[in-house]
Amino acid sequence: MSSAHGNDADRAAARRSLEGLALGDAFGERWFPLFRDPRQAYEEVRARRMPEERDWHWTDDTAMALGLIRVLDQYGEVRQRELALAFALGFDADPARGYGHGMHQLLPRLLQEPDRWPEFSRELFGGEGSLGNGSAMRVAPLGAWFRSSLRRVVEQATRSAEVTHAHPEGIAGAVAVAVAAALSARGQLSIAAVAELTPDSATRDGLARAAELPFTTEPWKASDVLGNGQRIRADDTVPFAVWCAARHPDDLVAALWATAEGFGDVDTTCAITGGIVAARTGVDAVPAPWLERREPLPGKAGHR
């Protein structure tokens, strides 16, 4: 069934990606020192022992992805004022989801004056705009939605990033992840193809390095080469997450374990990897205990 604002297949692809993004986000969050001693976390990840906590809560990665999906559902495209307001409303409803410093500055202002998003977004970080990984962490479902046209993926991902991440690196990170999710949904994921469509940037350079890194490399070693998000920058986050997704394009659980080996900003790297891989696989093959623990998503497809 089609409509002016997308069709059922677009929504289904985006929802698959969203489910994987939220699972990766909630799974990755379990490995932070707030929940585990680093040595314990390292041993459990290496042994592939599922976190035993009853509840795996998702963070701002998923909260912002939900805002993006709401805009796509309503309009079938990124409308930047409406997206600014959706992000701001999500923050206002639950500001304790782990939002970064820049979003704590920006989103309350957008709630009051969403029309001024271009000005407010550019003012962050001394007028340079944010080059962080926040635009990338939330965008995979958009790539799945527009998967039939990579030109549209690039265009819409750029528009989604500009609302909060005006720096070229922030935009490049979003484009790269959206393209990766689109290619994944098409069964064509290739790091080189992602790099080719990513704007000239340090993120693109990192993807070029990732494309040359053999999949026989242990993931923790790959994170040493590509970055693990510890610097909270797009170029320090996206290449490793895309590499992990391409290493396990048909196995969401294996992809998330590989990503977790890199630690760093592990909820975000896992959210990105999860959103990319699940655009193809969905979450049906994920063990039931994982899905039972993950905090449900709003809407009919939420688990538990």
Image: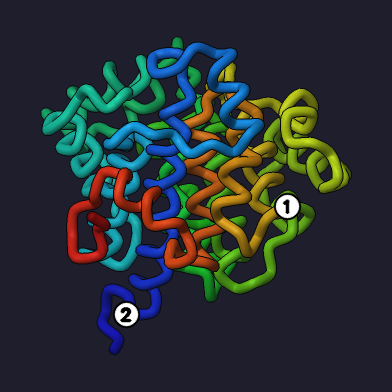
Q: Position of residue 160 (x, y in %)?
A: 40, 47
Quarter residue 90 falls in: top left
Relative vertical location of residue 51 with respect to residue 291 in this rendering, above or below: above
Residue in front for this viewpoint, 36 or 86: 36
Q: Which quarter of the rendered picture does the N terminus lie within?
A: bottom left
* Image side of residue 273 versus residue 112, left or right: right
Sequence-first tag of 2 and 1: 2
Quarter residue 209 falls in: top right
Residue 136 visible at all: no
Residue in the image at 81% along x and 43% along y: 208
Residue 58 visible at all: yes
**Crowd tier of the residue under label 2, counting other residues whose Cα lies within 10 Å: few below 14, some 14–19, many 20 or above:** few
- Residue flagged by tag 2: what amino acid is it? Asp
Q: Which mark is residue 8?
A: 2
Q: Position of residue 6 (x, y in %)?
A: 32, 75
Q: Count up the numbered dots.
A: 2
Residue in the image at 46% along x and 20% along y: 32
Residue with the mark numbered 1 = 247
The single residue placed furthest to the bottom in the displayed view is: 1
* Image side of residue 119 versus residue 92, left or right: right
Q: Nearer the viewer, mark 2 or mark 1?
A: 1
Residue in the image at 28% along x and 34% along y: 117
* Image side of residue 151 versus residue 156, left or right: right
